[in-house]
Image (cartoon, rainbow, N blue to C red):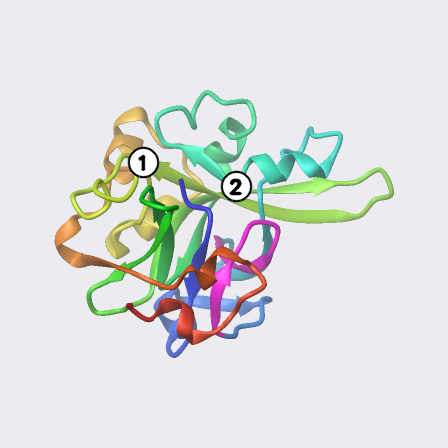
Amino acid sequence: MCGRFALTHIAGFWTRFAVIDRQATLGPRFNIAPSQTVPVIVSGSGNRAMPMRWGLVPFWAKDPKIGDKLINARAETVAIKPAFRTSLKGRRCLVPATGFYEWRKGKPGKVPYYVRMKDDSLFAFAGLYERWKGPDGSELLTFTIITTTPNAIMERIHDRMPVILDPSEEGRWLAKESLTEDDRAGLLDPYPARGMEAFEVSTAVNSPANESEELIRPI
């Protein structure tokens, strides 16, 4: 799964994601948790950066609290699950990040690891988003991150990892056209391990209340 991530440096962010409509604000984030709001990239008449809450609320949901259980969507079933299949057809998005956290089972407890690109560059998770309208007419934008099987870096830590898109495939993921099963299979594969690294970090990351650069430093 993917239950925590970071967006630690933002220099060149707008250019990296070809954003022409900046509706989201930017700032370094070291411990992004579910239910928090972050910039998400969607396609329109150009790429837009929209503020969205993590935890997808389907348009048909009666209660937005369902989003607490829908922070991730499995690549293997995303096309058939009622919560995600409509979004997959035309509401795909990029979730910008510079790294993510995962916990490995150990003694006496779970050990947190930080996973990033070897060059510490910006990348994007494959995501889905939804626009939910409340009974009072209020509107809520939410997203989920798609997960897949682990690569060689991740398999020693956890049995799932978020889908990281190759930069050359980001435009294809954002396009409004439907994706075939073969398209999805290629796009939602594990990111190659050779470009990534993982290292143990402080258990301070366990609390979403902690937010500092210390969280991403190796121990």
Tell me if residue 37 is in the magenta stretch.
yes
Say which residue appears at 56% left-offset and 49% top-offset. 34
Mark 2 lies on a secondary structure that is loop
**Is residue 15 shown above or below 75?**
below
For label 2, the crowd category at 10 Å Cα-Cα, with few meaning under 14, some 14 to 19 and many 20 or more, is: many
Q: Amino acid at mark 2?
A: Ile
Tell me if residue 36 is in the magenta stretch.
yes
Where's residue 110, x and y in %? Answer: 38, 46
Q: Which residues are magenta?
A: 28-42
Residue 214 is at least partly visible in this image: yes
Is there CB contact under 8 Å for labels 1 and 2?
A: no
Looking at the rendered image, the quarter that the N terminus falls into is top left
Looking at the rendered image, the quarter that the C terminus falls into is bottom left
Residue marked by disc 2: 71
Mark 1 lies on a secondary structure that is strand
Where's residue 145, x and y in %? Answer: 45, 44
Q: Amino acid at mark 1?
A: Thr
